[in-house]
């Protein structure tokens, strides 16, 4: 009797999850050539799928690659790319697999996958010489991982509010079958509005939520994010940063003092791992100081890339 009740309850939960998934899941379209037709930027076919990217600045300029964070794609670098372009740098930015207009391969979103994407993108750009790598949030450990694995391809490393500290995935999202359904029904739909918490004053970016929603309509977005979180649990960020620090590459660390996403208290551990890093806490800035305090961050970044990474 007890087992029958348990089975019945489980069936009800599965059914309810499936219904919620159908109603609330925002992913209704395939990301295909038609969807990309009016997208800005460029596309390249890499071994794991198509990558959306853009390049700006004079071809003679020093090469800089910008790596975005967990879920907001490469438009998060708009102001930074423009500033570096104006300063004479050749700057590239791209959408990590699963985000923006890049493919959403149905694979594990491991460190190996994301490292391979960055390496192959640089090869496709014919940038064999060392480049300056700039990583934001989750793009921080991704950039540090790349630095540790391929020091011969890196001239300098810049980290802006990099992911650090403990990472967890709520237990309900780890359940077999039901977990991914609950993720799509409960977590994914609110992600666009959730990005406003990265700012001290979100009213300065009234189109931020609408821009984010564009990528949410394409199938595979939520799956890629959940896989990224799941894969990240098995990776020690302390080890990633230590390995990058051991390369001796010039490094710059920038952190918003009022960051509520990755709090500035985590900066201490990153600084210990990369002791050569120049450190700049940025007042009146949250998780995205390169946007909120571009007046401070852009000069710091340009100065570092011009002189410290010779």
Image (tube, rainbow, N blue to C red):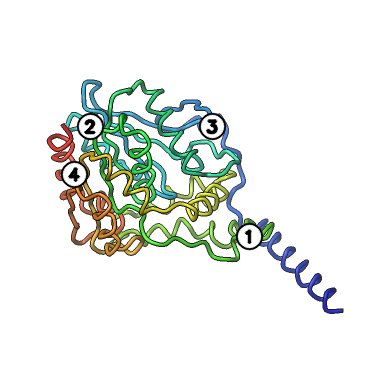
Label 2 sits on residue: 85
Which residue appears farthest toward the bottom when viewing the image? 1
| Mark positioned earlier in the residue sequence (4 or 1) | 1
- Which quarter of the rendered picture does the C terminus lie within? top left
Q: Secondary structure at mark 3?
A: loop
Determine contact: label 3, label 4, CB under 8 Å: no
Measured Cα–Cα span from mark 2 to mark 3: 29 Å
What residue is at 46 percent from the left and 43 percent from the top? 111
Q: Secondary structure at mark 4?
A: helix
Residue 9 relative to residue 149: left or right: right
Label 3 to label 4: alpha-carbon separation: 33 Å
Q: Say which of 1 and 72 sits in front.
A: 1
Q: Earlier in the sequence, mark 4 or mark 2?
A: 2
Q: Earlier in the sequence, mark 3 or mark 1?
A: 3
In which quadrant of the rendered view does residue 30 lie? top right
Asked if disc 4 and disc 1 are in contact, CB closer than 8 Å, the reply is: no
| Spot occupied by residue 125 in the image (x, y as percentages of width and height) | 37, 23
Residue 204, quarter of picture: bottom left
Look at mark 1 in the image and give the residue it sits on. 179
The residue that label 3 is drawn on is 48
* Residue 115 image offset from top left, x and y in percent: 43, 37
Dot 2 or dot 3: first in sequence order is 3
Within-10-Å neighbours for mark 1: few <14, some 14–19, many 20+? some
**Is the residue 161 above or below the residue 214 in the image?**
below
Mark earlier in primary sequence (1, 2): 2
In front: label 2 or label 3? 3
Q: Which residue is mark 4?
A: 298
- Tag 2's secondary structure? helix
């Amino acid at each position: 009797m007890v087992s029958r009740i348990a089975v019945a309850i489980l069936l009800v939960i599965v059914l309810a999850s499936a219904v919620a998934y159908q109603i609330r899941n925002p992913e209704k379209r395939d990301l295909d050539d038609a969807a990309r037709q009016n997208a800005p930027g460029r596309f390249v076919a890499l071994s794991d799928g198509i990558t959306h990217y853009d390049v700006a600045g004079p071809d003679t300029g020093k090469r800089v690659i910008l790596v975005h964070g967990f879920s907001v794609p490469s438009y998060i670098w708009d102001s930074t790319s423009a500033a570096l372009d104006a300063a004479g740098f050749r700057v590239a930015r791209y959408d990590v697999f699963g985000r923006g207009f890049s493919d959403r391969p149905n694979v594990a979103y491991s460190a190996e996958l994301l490292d391979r994407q960055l390496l192959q993108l640089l090869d496709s750009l014919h940038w064999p010489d060392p480049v300056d790598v700039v990583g934001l949030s989750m793009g921080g450990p991704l950039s540090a991982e790349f630095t540790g694995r391929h020091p011969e391809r890196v001239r300098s490393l810049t980290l802006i509010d990099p992911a650090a500290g403990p990472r967890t995935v709520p237990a309900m999202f780890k359940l077999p079958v039901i977990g991914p359904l609950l993720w799509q029904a409960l977590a994914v739909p609110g992600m666009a509005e959730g990005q406003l918490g990265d700012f001290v004053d979100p009213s300065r970016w009234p189109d931020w939520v609408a821009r984010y929603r564009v990528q949410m309509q394409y199938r595979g977005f939520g799956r890629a994010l959940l896989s990224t979180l799941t894969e990240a649990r098995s990776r020690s960020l302390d080890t990633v940063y230590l390995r990058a620090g051991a390369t001796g590459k010039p490094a710059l660390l920038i952190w918003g003092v009022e960051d509520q996403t990755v709090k500035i208290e985590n900066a201490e551990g990153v600084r210990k791992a990369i002791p050569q890093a120049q450190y700049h806490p940025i007042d009146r800035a949250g998780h995205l100081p390169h946007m909120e305090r571009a007046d401070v961050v852009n000069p710091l970044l340009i100065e570092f890339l011009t002189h410290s990474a010779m």
